[in-house]
Image (spheres, rainbow, N blue to C red):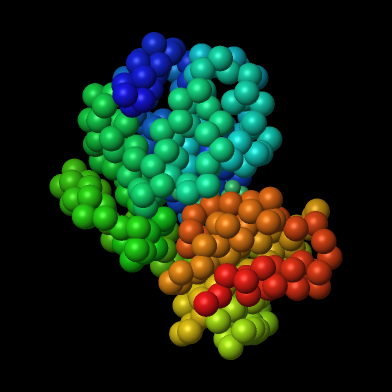
Amino acid sequence: MILDDISKEIKQANSIVILTHVEPDGDAIGSSLAMYNGLKKIGKDVDVIIQSFSKAFEFLPGAGQIKNESNKMYDLAIALDCGDIKRLSGFKEYFENTKCKIEIDHHEMNSMFADYNFVNPTAPACCQILIYVLKTLGIEIDKTIGTCLLTGIITDTGGFKYSGVTAETFEFAAELLSKGVNVSDIYKRVLQTQTKAKFELSKRAMSRLEFFSNEKIAFTYITKKDEEEVKSSNGDHEGIVEIGRDIENVEISIFLRETDDGYKISLRSNEYANVSDICLMFNGGGHIRAAGGFSSLPFEETKNRIIEECKKHLK
Ligand code: 5GP
Ligand code: MN
């Protein structure tokens, strides 16, 4: 069993590096810190390397120990919540330079880039998979680890509301609650409270929202200038794509975010469109109902191309 092999490799290794995808969301940070706290508990020399992350996640146990670089050589590298090695971004080298590589993930689109790939696309969050991994390692899930795990589950399920939620998700949540994890505090911090800058960006995106194809496609965007003007920081654009998704009759919501080299694309769908397939056309991927990609074409061309691709997936 792959899980036994992973457990054996982790037990054998002394120094371990944990990596996750760029622009980490709650599941990326939650899994990284759950693994970090778990491995510390069994005496491993472990580092989490993440360049930058939203301050909403600073409350997580171990967040203060996250490094943004390292020149150490590790025995083992673990990539979490990342379906594509390119998404490890500047940290790809840490992964590639390590002798033994493990990937634990739940993305539909996955390039199986490690020596051991434990991938379950039916899990609604990478954190849900980690519950099994940590148990196999004999690590007791305490309040500290549970807080990290529940953060990933809550953010990747939109607060237990997406279709990927399983009976197990609630069973795990109940188990974590019994360990003293404060669900309402996590929920408030990661899903409810937003920065003023995020609110201002959302307002701009909302006022620009356009509909296409009988209002089945919603489109909006933000520019670098917007982000400068509202003084946005890491993570402030997260969730804007959901504004269009949550309007009745919309099947696909498109959100473009201007960056230094082009446009980051975010797609969401409601009932049937496989947006991960659409993102393949834009060097990206993700899940069936939530995916991303990139375009280095100018704004109008990017907009037209993505809308045309989305139209092909409407019924
Ligand atoms: P978001 O729209 O929130 O950035 O991303 C939605 C989902 O798609 C996340 O699970 C994210 O990891 C994945 N995703 C976003 N951008 C990319 C990309 O460029 N490549 C791949 N493979 N996945 C992506
Ligand atoms: Mn995830």
Find residue 3 and report its horizontal and vertical position in percent: 33, 26
Front in this rendered view, residue 219 or 61: 219
Q: Residue at x 32, y 49 (%)?
A: 150
Would you say 30 lies left or right of 313 here?
left
Say if 75 sits above or below 105 in the image.
Answer: above
Residue at position x 31%, y 62% from top?
Answer: 160
Within the image, what quadrant is residue 144 found in?
A: top left
Q: Residue at x 43, y 13 (%)?
A: 13
Whether residue 200 is visible here, answered yes or no, is: no
Residue 44, by quadrant, is top left
> Measured from the top left, where is residue 254 in percent x and y?
61, 70
Determine the residue positioned at 29% across, 38% down: 131
Seen in the image, is 81 located left or right of residue 168? right
Q: Position of residue 278 (x, y in %)?
A: 61, 61
Q: In this picture, is 52 found above or below 167?
A: above
**In the image, is residue 158 above or below residue 134?**
below
- Residue that sits furthest to the right in the current view: 298
